[in-house]
Amino acid sequence: QLLQKKLSDEITADVANTEEQVLARHILVSDVSVALTLIERLKNGEDFGALAQEFSEDTGSAVNGGDLGWFGKGAMVAEFETAAFALEKPGDFTLEPVQSQFGYHIIQLIAKQDRPLNATQLEQARATAFSEWVTAIRDEYTVETYDDFWRQRVPTEPNFVTMATEAAVTSNAQLTESAAATPEATEVP
């Protein structure tokens, strides 16, 4: 374990402790026609936060105007993440509804920047980098593992006859050695 930790530290030493993250908010609806209507209202200058509070079906974020906070890649479902990271300038919003397993999203970018990873995120990034390195090395050197190799060599049931025979031989050898070491003790005076 100590060697693996040292190797992992060496391999992951250059893993960045920051990542690109976005601060975004969204409006979630279950009907595409409602989403299209809301996009038109946004284009006409209505307030995103007010529309999110009124129409969003995501009750957790709706009370905060649809605010989702900062998130990095891998934190949201793929469709949502792709659309959020594609937005370029603060204030931009998706001009087409983004469909996911939850419904139809309208996403607005508030900010985008490189932000420091917290300890858990950094450890996860390092674990991922090390795992990818191990996979690449295994592929490069065609390492094969035989998880069942030992099962072919280990008996499934103990052989008591052999164990008893070995114990008796060992015991007799010890008695013989003991008697040979003290011959005067066996002589009668």
Image (spheres, helix red, strand yellow):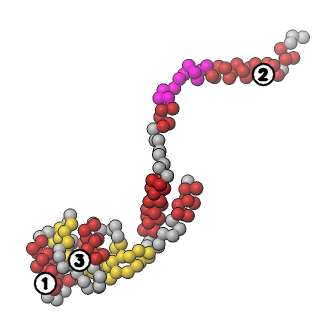
Q: Position of residue 177 (x, y in %)?
A: 77, 21
Instruction: State the image quarter where residue 36 is shown.
Output: bottom left
Mark number, residue 153? none
Disc 1 residue type (three-letter):
Arg
Name the residue nearer the viewer: 21 or 176.
Answer: 21
Mark number, residue 107? 3
Q: Which residues are magenta?
A: 154-165
Q: Is residue 20 magenta?
A: no
Q: Are marks 2 and 3 in contact (CB under 8 Å)?
A: no
Label 2 sits on residue: 178
Task: Of the two numbered discs 3 and 1 on the same chain, state the one appearing first in sequence.
Answer: 1
The number of discs equals 3
Mark 1 secondary-structure assignment: helix
Disc 3 residue type (three-letter):
Ile
Q: Quadrant of the C terminus?
A: top right
Mark 2 secondary-structure assignment: helix
Name the residue nearer the viewer: 67 or 138.
Answer: 138
In space, the residues marked 2 and 3 are separated at their CA atoms by 88 Å
The local crowd at label 2, few if under 14, some if 14 to 19, many if 20 or more residues have their Cα within 10 Å, is few
Name the residue located 43 percent from the left edge and 64 percent from the top edge.
124
Q: Is residue 28 in view?
A: no
Name the residue nearer the viewer: 132 or 28.
Answer: 132
In space, the residues marked 2 and 1 are separated at their CA atoms by 101 Å
Give left or right: position of 187 versus 62: right
Q: Is residue 184 above or below residue 23?
A: above
Q: Is residue 158 above or below residue 15?
A: above
Q: Residue furthest bottom?
A: 45
Label 1 sits on residue: 41
Mark 3 secondary-structure assignment: strand
Q: Are marks 2 and 1 in contact (CB under 8 Å)?
A: no
